[in-house]
Every structure is written in C-alpha cells, then in structure tokens.
Amino acid sequence: MEICKEVIFREARQLFRSEISKKRHINLAEIQNIYDKIPELKKIEAKIAELGQKSVLEVLKGKAPNRVLSLVKRHVLELKEEKKLVLRQHELTPSAISIKPSCKYCNDSGIVLESHCECFKKVLKKVICQYSELDYSKLCKIHNPGVLFNDKRVLKFNAIGGSSDTSLKCSDKNISSPNELGVWRSYSKSISHSIQRFVDIKKGKNNEKFHDNLLFYGPTGVGKTYISRYIYKLFIDDGRIAIYISAPQMFDLFEGEKFNRLEDKHSKFKLKLITNAQLLIIDDLGAEFCSSHVDTFLFNIINKRIEGSLKTIINTNLQPVKIKDMYSERISSRIVGNFEIIKCIGNDLRQLV
C-alpha cells in the first residue's frame, strides 16, 4: 500500500507543479500584454533598473554606500509613484503587473502549517480519480441529502441521496415500499449511519465488529452505483486511496497480465491498486464473461483484500443465490462471511428521470 501511495503522491506533485507553471506562464503573459499596451511603464522600469546599475558604479568609484543607497531609494520611490499614476490613468492597480500566486493560503507551495494545502489535495483527488476514470468535479455533485421521486411526488430526505423511488434493505431493516415520509426518513437515516460506519470506523460501542466490505445488489437503476460513488468520494476526500472499476474491465486487466498483453504503466499500476488500495469498488459484477480464469481472479482478489483488512464494495444485479450459482463455492462463502449484504429495490431511476 505504501508503494502505491508514494506513486500517487509523486504523480500529484508533478501535476501540481505543472499546473502552477501553466498558471504562472499565463500570469506573465498578461503582465507582458499590459507593458506592451502602456510603453510608459516600460520606460519607468528601465529607469529603475538603470538606477540600480549606477548605484553599483558609484560605490565602486569610492562614494559612501549609505549616501548612494539613500539617493537611489528616494529616486526609486518617486518612479514607483509615477508608475502608480500611469496605472491609475489606465484604470489599473499595481497588482495588475505583479506575479500573483494561484493559492493565497500556501503561495503555490502546496503546504500550509506542515500539512497539504487544499489546492494540492484537489490535484491529489484528480490523480486518484484518473485511475478510476472518474471526473472529480462530477463526483462533487453527489450530495447527502438527495432527492427521491416517488409516485410523481418529490420527497426530500436525509439519506445517501440520488436514488429514485428506491429503498434499501440491510440486515436490520426491511422496508421495501415506505408510504410515509417519516418512515422513509427514519429508514434512510439508518442506512446513512450504516454507510458512515463503513467509512469511519470498524468497531461500535460494545466492540461489535462491523463488516469491512459491502455488497449492493438489486436491479438496474436503483442507486447501487450512486451510493458506491458517494462512498468513493468520502474516501478520497479523507486522503485515502480508492479505485473504482467495472468487473469486465478488471478481469480484462487480469487476463492481460496473465497473457503478457499489458504494456502501459497506467494499466499495470491499476492492477496494484486493485490489490492494495484502501478501498476497491467493483461495479457490475456478473456482467463479465465467466470462465475458470475469472473465478480464480475474483477469489484471489477478494481473499487478498480480506487478509489485508482492506475494504471492498461490490455492486451487482445478481441475487445472492445467483452469485453462488455463477461463481465457485469458495467465492460465495467469502462474500457471505465477510460482506454486509444490502439489497437495493425500487423503480429504474433512468426511466423516471
């Protein structure tokens, strides 16, 4: 995990420096454009530079340094006032021709009080999302609370958000078609707490062990992907490394590695993240072409992550009994014993919107 984290942070630092350099280049071009439009500013800058050169020559000739410095300071101040006047005449301020940092908190260093600045964290999230082929700006639109559409009525509730006409069933709840807003809010709150426990802690007040893994199942469009992406966002917002990948794409990567078809570093590093990231989300399990290779790959990845106490989320349209039929007994055993199984039911969100 530490090696993966080091690679991610190194790429983030490189991207951060590159973005700062681009912004600095744009800033300098804007300043140059102002000087080109106002020749008087160039003349004033030339005079200031000339004063500096003359002062050095005066000191070398034997004149008193303090006296020379005092005269130079006075002339420079006069020229700066003249420059301000020229800028005001063109409705500009001195800041218009000064190099401005992109971030006022860290002055583009990426560090504030020995911690990473928010500007660097934003770049870090962008790098993490690249390996999941997700756009962080779109993830930011996933909020809690969300909006529920139910029988053409709009109900606002304090829940994970985004599911339309959707209820969730977990080990301690079974409300498949709530009719009252109060009941729905109460149920949604319990689901929110369940997800928050998964993100934040492993043990409850009485040292009750919570599952490190979740399996969301249900038909298409009932919110499995939305909720898992919400959890993904919470993880990377917390500075943790997570990868989100579809099952077909994941198995293609494993087969590519097995038959030496992977050439690019990006894909090879993705495989390392699948095994070592603090959170792995496998979307659409069951959509892949099933084979003995797939069964072996899936068992190995689930088993390694369980042994390493690394969190995993699986989204699938398959019923739990179908998972047992489609994959080996050892896979279904690992899922039943190590995953909290949450059922998502309701109308297809994509058809309602």
Image: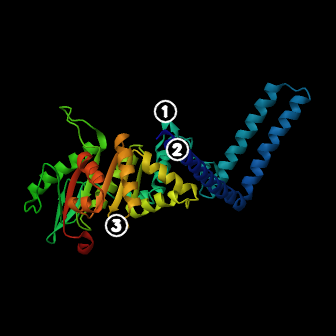
Taking the image as shown, residue 47 lies to the left or right of residue 321, namely: right
Taking the image as shown, residue 156 lies to the left or right of residue 292, namely: left
Q: How is the image coloured?
A: rainbow
Secondary structure under tag 3 reads: loop
Nearer to the camera, 172 or 154 = 172
| Residue 140 point in image, percent of width and height | 37, 56
Q: CA distance from mark 1 to mark 3?
A: 48 Å
Answer whether labels 3 and 2 touch (C-beta < 8 Å): no
Query: Where does label 2 land, which residue?
Result: 9
Q: Which residue is the extreme one toward the bottom?
A: 351
| Residue 90 point in image, percent of width and height | 63, 58
Residue type for callout 2 = Phe
Query: Where does label 1 land, which residue?
Result: 113
Q: Residue at x 20, y 60 (%)?
A: 321
Q: CA distance from mark 2 to mark 1?
A: 19 Å
Q: How many marks?
A: 3
**Circle nearer the N terminus (3, 2):** 2
Residue type for callout 1 = Leu
Q: Quadrant of residue 107?
A: top right
Taking the image as shown, residue 180 lies to the left or right of residue 95, namely: left
Taking the image as shown, residue 22 lies to the left or right of residue 255, namely: right
1 vs 3, front mark: 3
Q: Quadrant of residue 326?
A: bottom left
Q: Is residue 83 above or below residue 221?
A: above
Q: Residue at x 47, y 55 (%)?
A: 131
**Which of the labelled discs sits on residue 287, or is there none?**
3
